[in-house]
Amino acid sequence: MKEIRLSKVIVVTSGKGGVGKTTTSASVATGLAMLGHKTVVIDFDVGLRNLDLIMGCERRVVYDFVNVINEEASLKQALIKDKAHDQLFILPASQTRDKDAFTKEGVGRVMNELRDSFDYIVCDSPAGIEKGAIMALYYADEALVVTNPEVSSVRDSDRILGILAAKSKRAEDGVEPIKEHLVITRYAPARVESGEMLSLEDIQELLGINLIGVIPESESVLQASNAGVPVIRDDTSISGQAYQDLIARFLGEEKPMRFLDVEKRGILKRIFGA
Amino acid sequence: MSLLDYLKRSNKKSSAAVAKERLQIILAHEHAANNKTPDYLPTLQRELLEVVRKYAKIDVDDVKVTLGREGDCEIIELNISLPEQK
């Protein structure tokens, strides 16, 4: 008898662009693989492929997700094995086709095949609420909703929550809904304290979903993407550590949120400002 | 936050508070728009009125159609007031 895996499909989504979906996808997939879980991360952004750059495998792309859907290549041919973790694979997006290449049947067939051999399938959604984004969330069991402490991002996340609840396969089948988790990125505690940035409590209250991680604004995120190494692999970075905490919470561990305190300043600075 | 910042800001609301308030209003509005009553309700009301009018003399206001919700169930409530028998 074939061994049955309890694989999970996780969509990383946000509605709004530029909030950190790909950064989060890369770090979450890497983090799960670092803990020994066999993981694949899929880029759903057809035409604007970028996950390969963030994962540092852009020069090893031969076949892509659309080739597999169209049966022009096998999954085995298209999956790129990560150089640092042998439990981690990347399925890149097509750079030349458009999102009409996605069909529910085609994507579903690839998902089923992946479920047979992976513990976690991380789907990096494109921005927007069009076909690519809908396909990325359609088969999801859990969702990481990436939100910046900023009005347009919060509103778009709210919109995406509505779509998760209405247009996913779980919604259509009437089974247990997608488990939603809030990931707040580019968080700046000092700006929150001075009243110029929405606090994580504000965002949680507005969106009404469970917070799984707060990633502080940090220079190391840009440095990591420059190098093509997911920031979670940088132990010295507070963002990397915050992603490691997020993974621990995702796997059921209790961990308090860190990096929320404002750096203490001297008395003169406090009176006269920086 | 420095003391000078504090003095400068103390008489007005922080921009984050403004952002939260604006979001609370727009999200509530958008949620309401998503759960709006189906657009066939006015037509249903008019047609019901026509049918009942074949048998009894009633006014437009005597047919009331409202949409409610009880748990997962959507309930259409019809309330037709017939004229008193003479």
Image (cartoon, coloured by chain):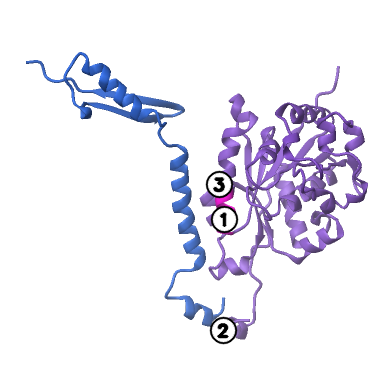
Chain colours: A purple, B blue
Same subunit, tags 2 and 3: yes
Is A169 located above or below residue A130 in the figure? above
Q: What is the three-letter code of the residue carrying label 1?
A: Ser
Q: Is residue A84 left or right of residue A176?
A: right
Describe the element under mark 3 as helix, strand or loop: helix
Residue A263 x %, y %? 66, 72
User: Which residue in the structure is indicated by mark 1?
Assistant: A152
Same subunit, tags 1 and 2: yes
Residue A161 x %, y %? 58, 42
Point 10% across, 15% down: residue: B85
The chain to which mark 2 is attached is: A
* Magenta-colored span: A150-156
Q: Are marks 2 and 3 in contact (CB under 8 Å)?
A: no
The chain to which mark 3 is attached is: A
User: Which residue in the structure is indicated by mark 3?
Assistant: A158
Point 93% across, 46% down: residue: A60
User: Which residue in the structure is indicated by mark 2?
Assistant: A271
